[in-house]
């Protein structure tokens, strides 16, 4: 049988045509006409003051903390169950990541856990739209307002999701998007910082290009303008090649999300009533972007054995996200038991817009069989 990959980017002829246009333009580098057009489109799409395209979401998180003035020794509360990029960004600015536990049903940061962690050194919160589902921003913003904190939305996984009718990416004063190959809109790699305050965007844009303005713009000035380096900056620019691909992808977001929704709905039908796993939970006030489809296995199931059986049949799978506080680089005395439990029991199965109905049925059937083998049970009961 043909392998069924865990992830697969939906890229095709329209994206190739867009790249060809960039080649013809003579400007494939960053902060050119395609990048500017993409930034304007993102700002309009999300109804925000500015959008800055960058090389990846980790870069966007770093720039956000710099623009928000986070200083060495400051504490930033971060969601624990996630890819560890938020905590890494906090470390980039020599601040202290403080890990907050998560909700057992959604894996998103628990607002009460956040409230309990606020100290006089706390300056902000990075919430994560975990695996594609938005966090509880109403409660989180109320906590932030009470203590004078900023909120950053890590919407890396959530392009296309919504919370209380608003799009993920527009749920906090600053949001960070990812355009990695497994996301709802992709250029292979890439990211964006979205800001309500244009001053935040201007700061991030300057720092994303070594602390100088756009070389493309300077090249159109008559004479010899010599840029001055006014800030310590970074090479976080997004190429115009990637920006052109993303403009096509943004026009396809609804179509691709509809296909992911159909896959998720079919998984829900095929795995309904399976006692050895729990299906993803989506609260009624939000929608899921389905970057990943993650089930939580019963405590008696050997997850490694399930994964080995699936991969042996050519079916991709993964562990889901990470309990960041357990990673060696971040290990501390703080515990996040819910996050640790999800890290131990969650399993990601194939989720992307290119899955066929037959492939979805094959994955679900193989998963049911693997669960029985890994738990010592049979369809008729105990072995």
Image (tube, rainbow, N blue to C red):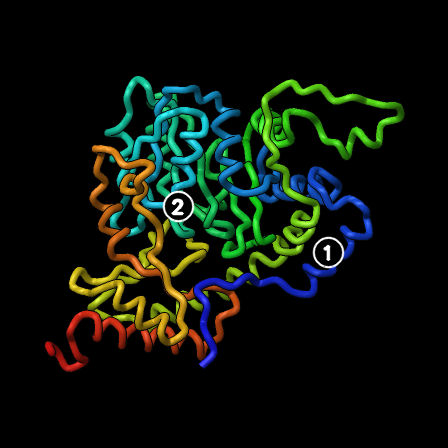
Above or below: residue 19 compared with residue 262: above
Q: Where is residue 28 in the image (x, y as percent from the top left)?
A: 74, 46
**Label of residue 18 in the image:** 1
Q: Which residue lies furthest to the left in this view?
A: 382
Q: Which mark is residue 75?
A: none
Is residue 118 in view? yes
Q: Residue at x 32, y 60 (%)?
A: 347
Where is mark 2, residue-wise? 83
Number of numbered discs present?
A: 2
Corner quadrant of residue 222: top right
Kindly report which numbered mark, 2 or 1, lies closer to the viewer in this rendering: 2
The residue positioned 36% from the left and 60% from the top of the image is 318
- 68 to 172, vertically: above or below: above
**In which quarter of the view is residue 376 placed?**
bottom left
> Upstream in the sequence, badge 2 or badge 1?
1
Q: Is mark 1 on a helix, strand or loop?
A: helix
Location of residue 212 in the rendering, given as x and y in whole percent from the top left corner:
68, 25
* Residue at 42 percent of width and 46 percent of height: 163
Left or right: where does residue 124 sit relative to residue 227? left
Residue 248 % position (x, y)? 66, 55
The alpha-carbon separation of the residues under discs 2 and 1 comes to 31 Å
Q: Is residue 243 left or right of residue 102?
A: right
In this picture, residue 215 sits left or right of residue 79: right
The residue drawn where x is 46% and y is 44% is 155
């Amino acid at each position: 049988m043909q392998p069924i990959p865990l992830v697969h980017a939906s890229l095709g002829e329209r994206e190739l045509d867009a790249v060809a246009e960039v080649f013809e333009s003579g400007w494939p580098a960053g902060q050119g006409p395609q990048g500017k057009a993409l930034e304007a489109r993102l700002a309009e799409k999300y109804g925000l003051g500015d959008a800055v395209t960058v090389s990846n979401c980790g870069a966007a998180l770093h720039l956000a903390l710099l623009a928000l003035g986070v200083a060495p020794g400051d504490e930033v509360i971060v969601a624990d169950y996630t890819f560890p990029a938020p905590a890494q960004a906090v470390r980039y600015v020599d601040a202290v990541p403080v890990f907050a536990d998560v909700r057992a049903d959604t894996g998103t940061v628990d607002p009460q856990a956040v409230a309990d962690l606020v100290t006089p050194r706390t300056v902000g919160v990075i919430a994560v739209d975990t695996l594609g589902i938005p966090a509880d921003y109403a409660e989180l913003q109320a906590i932030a307002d009470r203590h004078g904190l900023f909120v950053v939305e890590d919407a890396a996984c959530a392009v296309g999701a919504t919370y209380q009718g608003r799009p993920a990416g527009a749920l906090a004063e600053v949001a960070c998007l990812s355009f990695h190959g497994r996301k709802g809109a992709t250029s292979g790699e890439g990211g964006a910082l979205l800001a309500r305050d244009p001053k935040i965007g201007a700061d991030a844009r300057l720092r994303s290009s070594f602390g100088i303005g756009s070389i493309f713009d300077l090249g159109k000035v008559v004479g010899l303008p010599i840029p001055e380096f006014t800030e310590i900056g970074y090479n976080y620019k997004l190429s115009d090649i990637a920006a052109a691909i993303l403009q096509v992808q943004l026009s396809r977001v609804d179509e691709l999300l509809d296909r992911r929704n159909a896959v998720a709905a079919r998984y829900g039908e095929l795995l309904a009533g399976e006692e050895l796993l729990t299906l993803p939970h989506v609260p009624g006030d939000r929608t899921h972007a389905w970057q990943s489809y993650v089930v939580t296995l019963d405590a008696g199931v050997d997850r490694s054995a399930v994964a080995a059986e699936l991969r042996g049949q050519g079916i991709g799978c993964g562990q889901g996200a990470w309990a960041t506080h357990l990673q060696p680089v971040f290990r501390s005395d703080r515990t996040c038991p819910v996050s640790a439990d999800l890290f131990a029991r969650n399993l990601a199965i194939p989720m992307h817009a290119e899955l066929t109905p037959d492939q979805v049925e094959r994955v679900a059937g193989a998963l049911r069989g693997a669960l029985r083998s890994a738990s010592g049970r049979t369809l008729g009961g105990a072995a």
